[in-house]
């Protein structure tokens, strides 16, 4: 056999193609594959411990069951196959997993309590952060989606996740020698991941979507099993596609607008088709509720309308069915965060035929679909607007974000005050079993419902000892990662010797980890670098600061912020007190959330929709130090951390940053640091420990994903399921009625008017009788809602803080076709008050009187 190269030469043989070989497990250990392929192990400690037993070193290196089973010495597996104790543990864990998946949980008990629940819920998201072993996430949206699936599994919801499988996922981050972000895109090999291919029994299911020019986009479907929840991931990297279409699912948030819209078409339209194939293959009930986690999945609504039209329903009735059962969650408080495509690009992919019908969505006209994404700019298609128009129920992700969203999208409901815009709010939560560090669970047990009372009972010594333990673990991790990063950047071992003493397990530790987006203000802490240095290096009360985060590959501004921080951390006078750790992901996050005493968050208010990182810290006894934005705005109570004052009214950005940085430094110097270092006679910082206890016991239950998913179920999923059932009953009778009603309203509304508004009675006697003469444009009195609006009047003549009272018809139409509506109102305050009346559409399947965005007021007196 000829040698590859001469002796002494350097020659690397590159593989032409990679493939995966799995050596079968010994028969007694076959259930290891079952446990490894169900991602419940991510949050199940006993299963993790079983895999760690197989090879502790391999488990410590990558904590990935499938990779461990692929790399462990076969002799070790043979040894375990003969180990009665190990086999007994394996058998018990397999049985426990089967019981977990089969037994009814909270969701099932709701059904038994007489609350109608949906037989299936489809949850669409562009990314899912389940575990670092399945790298198809970038940040907060994906982690939130992953936690939603995990909590849905624990609560027993019949939910199915739908997303995309990215062959290169999101990028891995490293740093150049001078601190500039470098992106790497490792290949995701599905053969090495906990994924199974969806088949029709013999062959992989082929999901197809029409592309312009007579082409077809094909996708196969991988299934990740997350406890009870199947997660369907569409993958276009298959031989049936040409090179361009194979690359549709190459990277998360990569490519240009053309690449992005193909991904969103595949997610929305292909995702619905994948669901249908999954239900046909498995016999699982078809979902009746569809949840769009951001606007990326907006095309799912159009595809569902197409399905119903294909079955014989008219477009209006089909849209009524779809709207009734669609839910849209917006995650951005700024217009720049919304996916907006040029209408010409959307038109290109809708691919109209000569008659105006869409080849992408047969049965629908291209104009109908384009109107769903219409916004103020006639050349733009807005994915969020499509989500709202095809989702009868919608929400922001914190109470403050709900307010911001109602203001931001008020134009979709003209004539309504922002507080009447039908966008609700369900505050995000985080999955406790994923993010609560094991030492806490060993102290209070695994039952989330009882943990609050257990935390309340723990001694101060146990609380502080656990915080010390977790901080010490973080210090070890910081040293390891800082050294590895330095080596990756090209520094020698001699140059990195200082990392062995990086950080101190007894020092107050602050964490800041998030995307390097401008509004998150990564560098606010550097506003006065000398002052920060004094805080970090105080000889009596030092502080250490761990920082992490990624900038989008196309965001050079964000990369420059990271570089600025990295260069600051390299100052020899402070480098043992501040560190930037690259490649922030789930594995790093667990250590930082658990070990930090304080979680810092300083966004520009109100631009943080929720910001769940502080929640994960709180679940580990971390105290939040944050601008009152996102979730912190509603949950800060003065005992679980500190609110950084916001200079929200200051329009000069530089001055605002100066003021808020000053507030941050002052809080650290005068409140946070002294409290941490004040030791009582017990030797403990007792006041600090009591804030930790309060955070764990009182705040902890509020930030759990189980609370969030319960809220979604009772406030959105169950009502949507009921609306769907009503809409489709009796051969879609109610949906047809709503469609016909909408046509009548659209025709009549230009003629609807309040022709007169009269009062009688004595306002000073707290009684006012109002009569409105309403022209209904041919509509019946029971097809509208007429209301009196009473409240304080400001200097501009606007009614503020109004109260709304229903008005009732007093008879049939008069000779002019007008109907009198009356009510008696009672002013509940003194001062300058005013009143008016309004008319709104009313129909049984409308979830809110403002839903259609139609309202009529009378002309102001004298106007």
Image (tube, helix red, strand yellow):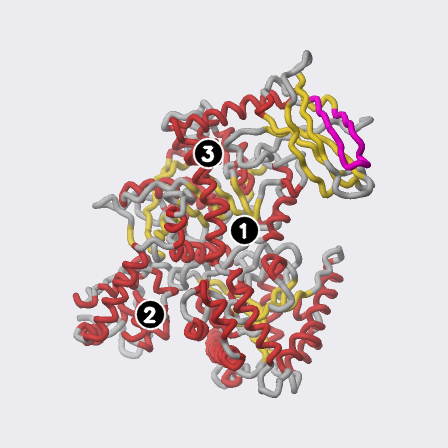
Circles 3 and 1: CB atoms closer than 8 Å? no
Residue 522 visible: yes
Nearer to us: label 3 or label 2: 2
In the picture, residue 796 is in which quadrant? Answer: top right
Sequence-first tag of 2 and 1: 2
Query: Dot 1, crowdedness within 10 Å: few (<14), some or many (≥20)?
Result: many
Structural crowding at the residue carrying mark 2, measured as other residues with C-alpha within 10 Å and reported as few (<14), some (14–19) or many (≥20): few
Label 3 environment density (alpha carbons within 10 Å; few <14, some 14–19, many ≥20): many
382 up-or-down from 637: above or below: above
Earlier residue among tags 3 and 1: 3
Task: Give coordinates of residue 512: x percent, y percent.
Answer: 57, 68
* SS at badge 2: helix
Q: Residue at x 40, y 44 (%)?
A: 114
Mark 2 to mark 1: distance in Å? 32 Å
Q: Is residue 27 magenta?
A: no
Q: Is residue 607 above or below residue 292?
A: below
Instruction: Name the residue: 27% across, 74% down.
Output: 54
Q: Which residue is mark 3?
A: 350
In magenta, the rendered stretch is 757-773
- The residue under the point 65% across, 34% down is 414
Residue occupied by mark 1? 426
Is 402 positioned to the left or the right of 282 in the image?
A: right
Disc 1 element = loop
> Of the residues under marks 3 and 2, which one precedes in the sequence?
2
Specify whether residue 762 is painted magenta.
yes
Q: Which residue is mark 2?
A: 46
Q: Quadrant of residue 580?
A: bottom right
Are the residues tagged 3 and 2 within 8 Å (C-beta)?
A: no
């Amino acid at each position: 056999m000829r040698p590859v190269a001469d002796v002494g030469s350097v020659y690397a043989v590159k593989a032409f193609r990679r493939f995966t070989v799995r050596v079968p497990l010994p028969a007694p250990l076959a259930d290891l594959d079952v446990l490894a392929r169900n991602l419940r192990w991510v949050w199940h400690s006993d299963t993790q411990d079983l895999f760690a037993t197989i090879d502790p070193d391999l488990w410590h290196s990558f904590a990935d069951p499938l990779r461990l089973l692929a790399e462990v010495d076969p002799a070790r597996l043979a040894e375990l196959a003969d180990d009665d104790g190990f086999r007994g543990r394996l058998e018990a864990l397999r049985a426990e997993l089967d019981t977990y998946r089969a037994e009814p949980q909270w969701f099932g008990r709701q059904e038994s309590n007489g609350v109608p629940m949906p037989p299936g819920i489809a949850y669409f998201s562009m990314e899912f952060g389940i575990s670092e072993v399945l790298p198809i996430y970038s940040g907060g949206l994906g982690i939130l989606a992953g936690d939603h699936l995990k909590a849905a599994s624990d609560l027993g919801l019949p939910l199915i996740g739908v997303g995309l499988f990215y062959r290169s996922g999101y990028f891995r981050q490293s740093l150049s020698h001078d601190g500039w972000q470098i992106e790497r895109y490792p290949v995701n090999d599905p053969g090495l991941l906990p994924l199974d291919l969806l088949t029709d029994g013999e062959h992989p299911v082929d999901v197809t979507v029409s592309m312009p020019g007579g082409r077809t986009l094909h996708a196969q479907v991988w299934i990740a099993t997350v406890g009870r929840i199947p997660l369907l991931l569409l993958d276009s990297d298959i031989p049936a596609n040409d090179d361009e279409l194979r690359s549709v699912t190459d990277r998360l948030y990569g490519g240009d607008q053309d690449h992005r819209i193909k991904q969103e078409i595949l997610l929305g339209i292909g995702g619905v088709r994948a669901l249908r194939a999954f239900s046909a293959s498995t016999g699982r009930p078809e979902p009746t509720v569809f949840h769009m986690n951001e606007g990326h999945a907006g095309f799912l609504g159009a595809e569902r309308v197409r399905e119903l039209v294909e079955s014989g329903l008219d477009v209006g009735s089909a849209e009524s069915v779809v709207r009734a059962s669609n839910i849209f969650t917006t995650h951005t408080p700024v217009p720049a965060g919304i996916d907006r495509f040029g209408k010409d690009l959307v038109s290109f992919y809708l691919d109209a035929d000569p008659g105006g019908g869409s080849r992408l969505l047969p049965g629908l006209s291209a104009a109908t679909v384009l109107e769903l994404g219409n916004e103020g700019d006639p050349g733009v298609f807005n994915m969020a607007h499509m989500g709202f128009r095809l989702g009868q129920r919608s929400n922001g992700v914190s109470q403050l974000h709900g307010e911001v969203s109602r203001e931001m999208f008020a134009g979709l409901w003209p004539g309504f005050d922002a507080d009447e815009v039908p966008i609700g709010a369900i505050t995000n939560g985080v999955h406790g079993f994923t993010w609560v560090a094991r030492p806490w669970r060993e102290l209070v047990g695994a039952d989330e419902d009882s943990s609050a009372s257990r935390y309340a009972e723990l001694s101060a010594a146990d609380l502080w000892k656990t915080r010390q333990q977790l901080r010490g673990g973080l210090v070890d991790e910081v040293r390891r990662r800082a050294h590895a990063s330095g080596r990756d950047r090209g520094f020698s071992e001699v140059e990195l010797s200082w990392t062995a003493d990086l950080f101190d397990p007894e020092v107050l530790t602050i964490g800041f980890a998030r995307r390097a987006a401008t509004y998150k203000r990564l560098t606010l802490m550097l506003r006065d670098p000398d002052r920060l240095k004094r805080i970090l290096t105080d000889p009596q009360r030092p502080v250490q600061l761990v920082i992490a985060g990624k900038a989008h590959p196309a965001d050079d501004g964000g990369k420059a912020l990271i570089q600025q921080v990295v260069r600051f951390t390299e100052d020899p006078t402070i480098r043992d007190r501040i560190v930037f750790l690259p490649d922030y992901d789930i594995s790093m996050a667990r250590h930082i959330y658990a070990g930090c005493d304080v979680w810092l968050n300083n966004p520009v208010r109100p631009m943080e929709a929720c910001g769940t990182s502080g929640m994960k810290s709180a679940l580990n006894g971390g105290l939040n130090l944050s601008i009152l934005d996102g979730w912190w705005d509603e949950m800060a109570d003065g005992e679980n951390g500190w609110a950084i004052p916001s200079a929200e009214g200051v329009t000069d950005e530089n001055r605002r940053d100066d003021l808020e940085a000053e507030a941050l430094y002052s809080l650290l110097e005068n409140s946070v640091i002294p409290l941490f270092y004040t030791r009582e006679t017990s030797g403990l910082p007792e006041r600090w420990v009591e804030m930790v206890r309060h955070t764990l016991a009182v705040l902890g239950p509020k930030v759990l994903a189980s609370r969030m998913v319960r809220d979604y179920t009772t406030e959105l999923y169950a009502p949507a399921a009921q609306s769907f059932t009503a809409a489709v009953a009796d051969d879609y009778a109610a949906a047809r009625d709503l469609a016909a009603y909408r046509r009548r309203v659209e025709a009549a509304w230009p003629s609807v008017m309040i022709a007169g508004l009269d009062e009688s009675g004595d306002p000073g006697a707290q009684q006012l009788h109002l009569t409105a003469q309403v022209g209904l444009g041919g509509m019946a009195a029971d097809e509208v809602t007429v209301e009196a609006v009473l409240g304080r009047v400001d200097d501009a003549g606007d009614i503020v803080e109004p109260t709304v009272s229903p008005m009732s018809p007093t008879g049939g139409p008069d000779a002019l076709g007008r109907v009198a509506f009356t009510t008696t109102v009672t002013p509940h305050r003194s001062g300058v008050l005013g009143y008016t009346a309004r008319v709104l559409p009313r129909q049984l399947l409308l979830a809110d009187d403002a839903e259609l965005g139609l309202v009529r007021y009378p002309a102001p007196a004298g106007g």
